[in-house]
Amino acid sequence: MDTHAVIDTLNELLALELHSLAPRLIESATFVSARSTRDFDRLQRLAGASRRHAAALAERIQSLGGVPQPTPPRTDSAGLHFQELAHARAAIRADLQSTIRACTFAAQRLSTAPQETRLIALILEDHHRSLELLSA
């Protein structure tokens, strides 16, 4: 696979991480009640993972001579900002599942690029752990 195609694929994954619901909900100061404090702690862990993934993907893109592509802000999550976190869990879970599918497909496309495949495998492991965390 040529380097430009690898960079394009990594930029697609970077956009997914940058658009992840968890960091958006943290940044928008979702209402947190005493009842949802545990969920908020989980959400902070998920948001941290998305930020780490985005940084790792951007670093890899740059190491290949590419430029991480900026992405417009996500607007479809606006209604979630005013919900208890427990009610937003289904949307967060669906967002994670969609990202897992995209990462799995990207890993298949990049099967001839071992460094990128390893990076995506680590990201996938984190996302699977995040799903388990949401279910706990």
Image (cartoon, grey):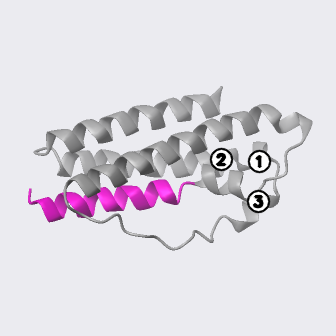
Task: Check disc 2 and report its element: helix, strand or loop.
Answer: helix
**Location of residue 57 in the rendering, given as x and y in whole percent from the top left corner:** 35, 50
User: What residue is shown at x 50% (from left), y 29% (from top)?
Assistant: 129
Res. 87 mark: 1
Marks 3 & 1, CB-CB < 8 Å contact: no
Q: Specify the amino acid type for callout 3.
A: His
Q: Nearer the viewer, residue 22 or 56?
A: 56
- In the rendered view of the protein, which quadrant contains the C terminus? top right
Q: Specify the amino acid type for callout 1.
A: His
Q: Mark 2 = which residue?
A: 90
**Location of residue 105 in the rendering, given as x and y in whole percent from the top left corner:** 28, 50
**Location of residue 80 in the rendering, given as x and y in whole percent from the top left corner:** 73, 59
Task: Check disc 1 and report its element: helix, strand or loop.
Answer: helix
Q: Specify the amino acid type for callout 2.
A: Ala
Task: Check disc 3 and report its element: helix, strand or loop.
Answer: helix
**Of callouts 3 and 2, the N-terminal one:** 3
How crowded pointer 2 is (Cα within 10 Å; few <14, some 14-19, many 20+) is rated as few
Q: Taking 105 as reference, is 42 above or below it? A: above
Question: Along the horizontal axis of the image, is 133 left or right of 35?
Answer: left
The answer to which image quadrant residue 13 occupies is bottom left
Q: Taking 131 as reference, is 96 above or below it? A: below
Q: Main secondary structure of the magenta part?
A: helix
Q: What range of the chain is rendered magenta?
A: 1-20
Q: CA distance from mark 3 to mark 2?
A: 14 Å
User: What residue is shown at x 54% (from left), y 52% (from top)?
Assistant: 95
User: What residue is shown at x 63% (from left), y 69% (from top)?
Assistant: 76
